[in-house]
Amino acid sequence: MNVLSIAGSDPSSGAGIQGDIKTFTSLGAYGVGAITALTSQNSSKFFKSEPASSEIIKSQIRSVLSDFKIDAIKIGMVYDKKTIKTIHSELKNLKVPIVLDPIFESTTGGTLLLANAFSDFKKLLIPLSYVITPNVPEAERITGMKIKSWGDAKKVAQKINSMGAKNVIIKGGHMQDDKVTDLLLENKKFYMFSQKRLTRENHGGGCIFSAALCVNIAKGKGLLESASLAQKISFESIKNSARVGKGLSIARQKNADIIEYDLSIAINQFVNIKGIYNYIPEVQTNFVFSKPCPESISHILGLEGRIVKTGELVAVVGTLKYGGSKHVANAVLEITRKFPSIRSAVNIRYDNRIIKKAIAARLCVAYYDRVLESHDTKVTEGKTISWGIKSAIEKLENPPDIIYHRGDVGKEPMILLFGKTPKDVLTKLVKIV
């Protein structure tokens, strides 16, 4: 999935657009950005900031939206009235979930929203948001109300909701509790979730929370689950923070799951192949990528849902999960037993013309006949795919690029395309479609 950050530039890379892109990438999303302002700051001190022009902000947003399918948007530092009005104008008719992270001051002491722009922030950006994520001081400033208890926090959340935000998360790091508790108001109901309080002061933990929230929403997860996961990710990033410069520790994410990142990018590319809807079978499509030497499908990443077609449109339904795919994952599981380098696969609609193209392109093509499958194998859950792949590769010395079958009674014919990586699979796919 693709996630857009509209935010200021932080040269320390602890927060701002640089921090957002790092978080997006670590969580398997492709991050794109539109810079609203340039700041001069480091881990010790804030020096200066300058807004980008309305024209360049508009151009950045339009250039990204015209080229990428954006699954969620995060808005961070907006700085002045012109920036706010430009963002509102460009996004007001967009049907994409927006995470609004109020950025009023830097942890290094700088002003990130001019005082005369505050009313426009409330009037124009809050109503755009699917969810807004202020901390306690920010929530107090937005509403003019004080928060001294969780009862106060609930009233403040309701007030922000009445200002147009569909959902509200108040981050509770400033509350005087043993744990850090965040409050979610979703569909008029309150939820609270907590983590152990860490005493270390850091730069970027709040930005990581909202960026992680944005990615999980883009993945199709519910808001409660997304918020809970974002809190855990933020906690781990603060726990993993390091004093890179001379001042505050920089919050840092753990290394990205490269398997999730590579597969996510490949799925994005797959759905954008011209005319790919012609190759989606009736049972729809899944795309998987395995850890090295998988022992079960729990080691193979795939979609819990499917890549589906509606007319000439193709969409991803569901989220990536280890064990999320059964049929395509079982095919990879079986093939890795003989050819461990083959770790990725996608299924597409059977068409004899595709097989002919594959042979002409010198791809290795194998076949199995489902009519020869025994009754016991047919009626045993999960056995058919393993039997078919094993039958197809039994006499092969080199790994196949394609394995296909022509179906059976009640079973749709299918082509499975294999590769070492999702990128390898796509390279082969483009040759034959």
Image: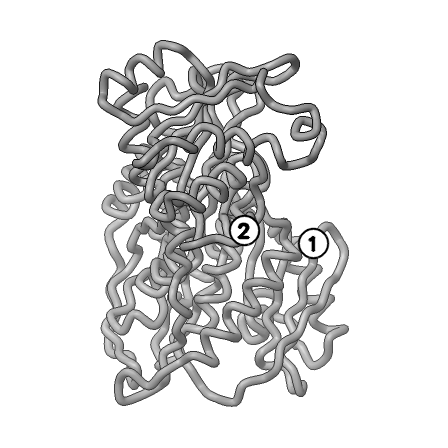
Whole-angstrom CA distance, mark 1 to mark 2, is: 28 Å
| Residue 25 image point, x, y percent | 37, 56
- Which sits in the foreground, 73 or 240? 240
- The first of marks 1 and 2 along the sequence is 1
Q: In this rendering, is residue 231 above or below 100?
A: below
Q: Residue 308: which numbered mark, if any?
A: none
- Which sits in the foreground, 340 or 143? 340
- Residue at the far front in the pictured view: 395
| Quadrant into which the N terminus falls | top left
Residue drawn at the location 42% of the way across and 36% of the way down: 345
Q: Is the residue marked by circle 1 packed among few (<14), some (14-19), or many (20+) residues within 10 Å?
A: some
Q: Would residue 374 be seen by someone viewing this image from the given angle?
A: yes
Q: Residue 186: which numbered mark, if any?
A: 1
Res. 52 image quadrant: bottom left
Q: Is the residue marked by circle 2 packed among few (<14), some (14-19), or many (20+) residues within 10 Å?
A: many
Q: Nearer the viewer, mark 1 or mark 2?
A: 2
Per the image, the residue denoted by label 2 is 322
| Quadrant into which the C terminus falls | top left
Amino acid type at image mark 2:
Tyr
Amino acid type at image mark 1:
Glu
